[in-house]
Image: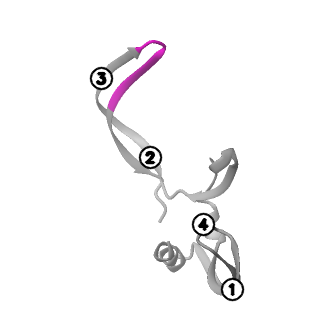
């Protein structure tokens, strides 16, 4: 992920600083070793693209995170579709389509 964050930093969307943090083991347990890590923070320029998300975590918990959205997918054309397949109360149709990206960030 560091290369991706460096790319975001190069266009002014995140800033970074080195901080000292306690290490964690492979099993995510704290260990008695402090290490220097790079801490990234979203800049004001990126906040217009921030999209708060909630995902289900292991054990049924909910995790909050922020995705960055640089454009919006829009339907361009439906190429073809296959009729709904009905299995009891369940129905499913297959739709083939083309999309385009709109509102792309500079």
Residue corresponding to mark 3: 82
User: Quick check: 50 above or below 93?
Assistant: below
N-terminal of the pair, mark 2 or mark 3, is: 2
Tell me the distance, in whole angstroms, between the alpha carbons under discs 1 and 3. Answer: 58 Å
Q: The residue tagged with tag 1: helix, strand or loop? A: strand
Q: Nearer the viewer, residue 76 or 79?
A: 79
Asked whether disc 2 touches disc 3, contact meaning CB atoms under 8 Å apart, the reply is no
Asked whether disc 2 touches disc 4, contact meaning CB atoms under 8 Å apart, the reply is no
Identify the colour scheme used. one colour
Tell me the distance, in whole angstroms, between the alpha carbons under discs 1 and 4. Answer: 33 Å
Q: Is residue 26 magenta?
A: no
Asked whether disc 1 touches disc 4, contact meaning CB atoms under 8 Å apart, the reply is no
User: Quick check: 43 above or below 47?
Assistant: below
Residue corresponding to mark 2: 73
Which of the two marks, 2 or 3, is nearer to us in this view?
3
Q: Tell me where residue 81 appears, x and y as whole percent.
A: 30, 25
Residue 46's tag is 4
Q: Is residue 57 visible?
A: no
Q: Tell me where residue 102 appears, x and y as whole percent.
A: 44, 50
Q: Is 18 positioned to the left or the right of 100 in the image?
A: right
Query: Main structural element of the magenta stretch: helix, strand or loop?
Result: strand
Q: Is residue 93 magenta?
A: yes
The residue shown at (62%, 60%) is 48
The residue shown at (58%, 57%) is 67
- Residue span colored magenta: 87-95
Q: Quadrant of residue 20?
A: bottom right
Q: The residue tagged with tag 2: helix, strand or loop? A: strand
Residue 33's tag is 1
């Amino acid at each position: 992920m560091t290369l991706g964050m460096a790319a975001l930093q190069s266009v002014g969307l995140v800033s970074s600083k080195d901080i000292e943090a306690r290490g964690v083991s492979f099993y995510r347990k704290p260990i008695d070793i402090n290490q220097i890590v790079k801490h990234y923070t979203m800049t004001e320029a990126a906040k217009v693209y921030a999209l708060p998300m909630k995902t289900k975590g292991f054990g049924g918990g909910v995790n909050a995170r922020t995705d960055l959205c640089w454009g919006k997918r829009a339907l361009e054309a439906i190429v073809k579709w296959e009729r709904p397949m009905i299995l009891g109360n369940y129905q499913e149709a297959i739709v083939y389509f083309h999309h385009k990206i709109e509102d792309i960030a500079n």
